[in-house]
Amino acid sequence: MTVETQYLSAQPKLRATTTVLGAIAIAALLVAPFVVYPIFLMSVLCFALFACAFNLLIGYVGLLSFGHATFFGGAAYFTAHAVKVWGWEPLSGILLGAAGAAALGFVVGFLAIRRQGIYFAMITLALGQMFAFICLQVPFTHGEDGIQGVPRGHLLGFIDLNEPLAMYYVTLAIFLFGFFAIWRIVNSPFGNILKAIRENERRAVSLGYRVDRYKLGAFVMSAALAGLAGGTKAIVFQFATLTDVQWQMSGEVILMTLLGGIGTLVGPAIGAGLVLALQNYLAASDFPVTVLIGIIFVVCVLLFRRGIAGEVMEFFKTRFNRST
């Protein structure tokens, strides 16, 4: 039996296993707020969606953005302002945040995608810092105080988001929607072209693809989904601050993605959960949380180069191939 035949025969088993694991994960998320503090779970879901959105760009296009906090934090400001000052319904405010993040993504992407590698990363970092400075200066963000006291309101006029369980399940629905959107993009013809660009951009150009357009499209999609996460976070925690737009937030989402596994769908979500769990449960201890996260990161880079999810997936693939 050839390697190709073994791979094809293992695919149904892999798909079946993935479906079962996905169903178990969704079931666990449905009952999780009865076991774990809902606010912590909502934080994990927001950052998991943010990390998955970032992974769409770095994992499937090969573009490392150091300015993704611009879209996450910018959407948080847009949503918070629309809901608190304009009196918008929360879902409309979140969608405005995602749309605003997509617009920012178009501007940043248009200026950055003509460069590659470290030059692309530095341009996104510079533009992100410029946006953070703008957020510090413009009146509607309230400077260092941020926008506080954002009302959660009633979703669609009748779902009271001040109830923790209602807010949690709405956050879960938004996360699942964003995750499904990423899965659909990755497994579409558009996603296959993005992977081809990542593997060999010159060959994609020689085949006639407008590479810059595909990169820009992926950048805007990633920014919009990051904005969806940022807008949801603004409603969950009822504030938007400069912390959301600063470069440290971009660095944090890169760390989450690397720990979970670049180029895997669930890896960034796992990485986000790990980082937030460490920050939350070790915050009261004397041991510096950043030191522990750094140690874990070094161990993962040295021993688990594919990330947590990447190593687990490789293990299952190896077992299925051996069994066939």
Image (cartoon, rainbow, N blue to C red):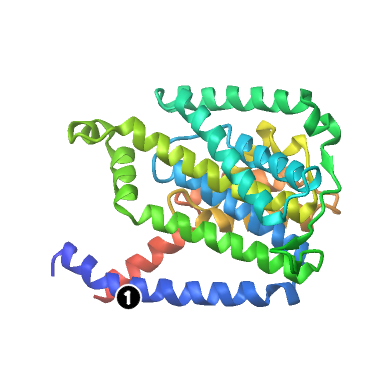
* Local secondary structure at mark 1: helix
The tally of labels here is 1
**Which residue is at the front of the view, 321 or 84?**
84
Report which quarter residue 315 is drawn in. Answer: bottom left
Q: Residue at x 45, y 26 (%)?
A: 110
Quarter of the picture containing the C terminus is bottom left
Mark 1, Cα crowd under 10 Å, few <14 / some 14-19 / many 20+, is few
Q: Residue at x 49, y 32 (%)?
A: 106
**Which residue is at the front of the view, 303 or 11?**
11
- In the figure, is residue 53 to the left or right of 168? left
List x then y, in percent, for residue 222: 50, 43
Whether residue 8 is visible, yes or no, is yes
- In the figure, is residue 210 to the left or right of 168? left
List x then y, in percent, for residue 138: 76, 25
Residue wearing tag 1: 13
Is 214 placed above or below 44 here? above
**Which residue is at the front of the view, 86 or 186?**
86
- In the figure, is residue 172 to the left or right of 243? left
Q: Residue at x 20, y 34 (%)?
A: 208
Report which quarter residue 273 is drawn in. Answer: bottom right
Quarter of the picture containing the N terminus is bottom left
Whether residue 300 is visible, yes or no, is no
**Which residue is at the front of the view, 99 or 59?**
99
